[in-house]
Amino acid sequence: MISPALIDRLGSASALATTVNQQYLRQLCQKAEAEGLSVGGLLRQAGLTEMALDRPVALGALCRVIDALQASLPRDDLALEVALGTPPGAHGPLVLLLTSAPTLRLGLLDLIRFYLLRTRALQLTLEDQRTSGVLAVRPALALGQHELFLLEWALANLLGLLAAAKGAAMSSCAFELPRPKVGRAWIAAAKSWGMPAPTPGSGAIVQLPAGLLDQAQATANTMEYRHALRTCNDLLRQQEEARQHVARLSTLLVKGGADHEFRQGELARRLGLSTAAMRRHLRVEGLSFDELVEFSRRRQAWALLRESSLPIAEVAGKLGYRDASNFSRSCRRWFGMTPGDLRRAAADSKQ
């Protein structure tokens, strides 16, 4: 049968849906460096180079870095340690939005709206109760074995931002961890944020008194707030434009069939873009042109092997391979099995 893990390896139809901001990869690398580990070695274990630190990174690749770091530092609270090593200013315009907004509620609503600039794998929500507001971090898609790490990492980053913005007022707040038992590291972190010890539970949740949410912030600054809003809106617009152009480019590659020898300039002209603009949109999506071609081939190989009865040699030809053995090697790299094994596994999963 086809396992969920194998399906995950296909990647998303939209690169951005499974990418995260490079800031998170940098946090992992900073932790590795602080522990005396080789950053280059950590990245190589995940199939990345140091160039990955300058653009959004695929969620799957980030999770491979997490696995490599956990193998070297097998600690239950490693996600918390990574977040504690990150200064609030590293979060860029998001922290400025939170601190310069007229009220904490408005700052949090802005943070929720612009969290897409960080990732679409997680989402923030703010729900009003009678005397408080509940801020929650939730998965936006299936995260498998990495869900706990990613939720606690995001929660610790968020609590660090709140503590930087509200200081002593954090004593009136409380938070819950998505685990049945709270360790000493989290209790110590809560104390450093000026908060009571967290409680065990089923979610990553922060409870904030309504009075704290709606009172005027001492750090409010109209000019800084407008600047942060403008910056975030511009970044979100660039992100959406990149999504649309990369989706169109991906469609052109799929429609090209065996013609994977497209020149970048030719494809850019079909999109009404310069080659430089096309590359810029790809970088925003965390991709290079070669990676998108590879992504297209992988998706087409999956569909043709799973849904058609074409001979494997013909499938290879449709994807631009002149040699079926090269296609077989690609399938092993993509799916961990040969084309024949993948076809048989797909057939078994339908029975």
Image: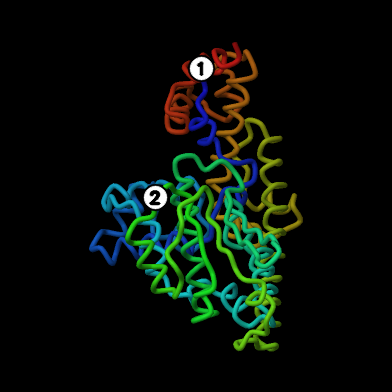
Q: Mark 1 vs mark 2: give the one in front.
A: 2
Task: Give the x, y percent position of residue 63.
Answer: 44, 47
Pointer 1: residues within 10 angstroms few (<14), some, or many (20+)? some
Residue at the image position 30 percent from the left and 52 percent from the top = 75
**Relative to 236, is 3 on the left or the right?**
left
Residue at the image position 39 percent from the left and 50 percent from the top = 181
Tell me which amino acid carries mark 1. Answer: Ala
CA gap, disc 1 and disc 2: 39 Å
Tell me which amino acid carries mark 2. Answer: Lys
Residue to which mark 2 is pinned: 181
Q: Hey, which quadrant is residue 240 in on the image?
A: bottom right
**Relative to 79, is 54 on the left or the right?**
right
Residue to which mark 1 is pinned: 345
Q: Hey, which quadrant is residue 108 in on the image?
A: bottom right
Q: Residue furthest toward the top? A: 351
Task: Give the x, y percent position of residue 346.
Answer: 55, 18
